[in-house]
Image (cartoon, rainbow, N blue to C red):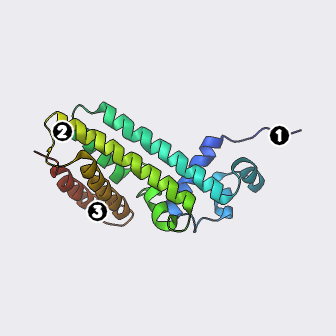
């Protein structure tokens, strides 16, 4: 007879996600995960599989949470520039109680060169981010807010690259004011 789980899977997955985000994949041990998630080792294996599978699930969870947050910010915006500022704010600051930087960027830097699964997940997330930026840029071009001198897709690639750099810098002690200054200059390249 199997026992009922005594924990909420989403809640403990969020705890694993946060630990991977703070420490990275390599530095996070199974002992760390068991302690941080507050479940038994056997429950971890039975529910999530091995460390690598748990990590991939944490990346998926992170991607869905960030995507939802970005979508909410864009939907609340009245102008394309407002939407872009919302996206950039989320990318630089994350959530109020979230670790610095971006789990997807951190994971790509740490593992993508040697882990095809992480490479696929990070590349997919980056493609989605570029598509969102492209849609915002097209909106701004249609409304006359942004220049049409450049292709929206190319501008999105450029801004995404700036965003990846900003999310990497956010892991350091560089002041947030500097990150916002860099972001603002980058966004001004879109102005007519």
Quadrant in which the N terminus appears: top right
Badges 1 and 2: C-beta atoms under 8 Å apart? Answer: no
Q: In this figure, which residue is indicated by the disc labeled 2?
A: 141
* Alpha-carbon span between mark 1 and mark 2: 57 Å
SS class, disc 2: helix
Residue 26: which disc?
none
Badges 1 and 3: C-beta atoms under 8 Å apart? Answer: no
Q: Position of residue 27 (x, y in %)?
A: 57, 68
Residue 175: which disc?
3
Q: Position of residue 163 (x, y in %)?
A: 32, 55
Tell me which residue sits at (40%, 49%) in the image: 127
Front in this rendered view, residue 192 or 148: 148
Tell me which residue sits at (23%, 31%) in the image: 78
Question: Which of the marked residues, 1 or 3, is nearer the chain's N terminus?
Answer: 1
Question: Which of the marked residues, 1 or 2, is nearer the chain's N terminus?
Answer: 1
Residue 138 in which image quadrant? top left
């Amino acid at each position: 007879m199997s026992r009922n789980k005594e924990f909420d899977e989403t809640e403990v997955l969020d705890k694993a996600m946060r630990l991977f985000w703070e420490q990275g994949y390599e530095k996070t041990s199974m002992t760390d995960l068991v302690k941080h998630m507050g479940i038994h080792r056997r429950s971890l294996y039975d529910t999530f599989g091995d460390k690598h599978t748990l990590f991939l699930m944490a990346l998926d969870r992170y991607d869905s949470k960030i995507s939802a947050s970005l979508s909410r910010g864009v939907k609340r915006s009245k102008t394309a520039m407002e939407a872009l500022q919302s996206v950039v704010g989320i990318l630089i600051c994350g959530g109020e109680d979230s670790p610095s930087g971006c789990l997807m960027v951190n994971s790509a830097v740490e593992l993508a060169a040697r882990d095809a699964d992480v490479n696929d997940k990070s590349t997919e997330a980056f493609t989605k981010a570029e598509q969102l930026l492209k849609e915002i840029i097209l909106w701004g071009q249609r409304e006359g807010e942004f220049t049409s001198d450049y292709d929206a897709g190319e501008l999105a690639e450029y801004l995404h690259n700036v965003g990846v750099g900003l999310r990497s810098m956010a892991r350091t002690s560089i002041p947030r004011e500097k990150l916002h200054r860099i972001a603002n200059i980058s966004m001004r390249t879109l102005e007519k």
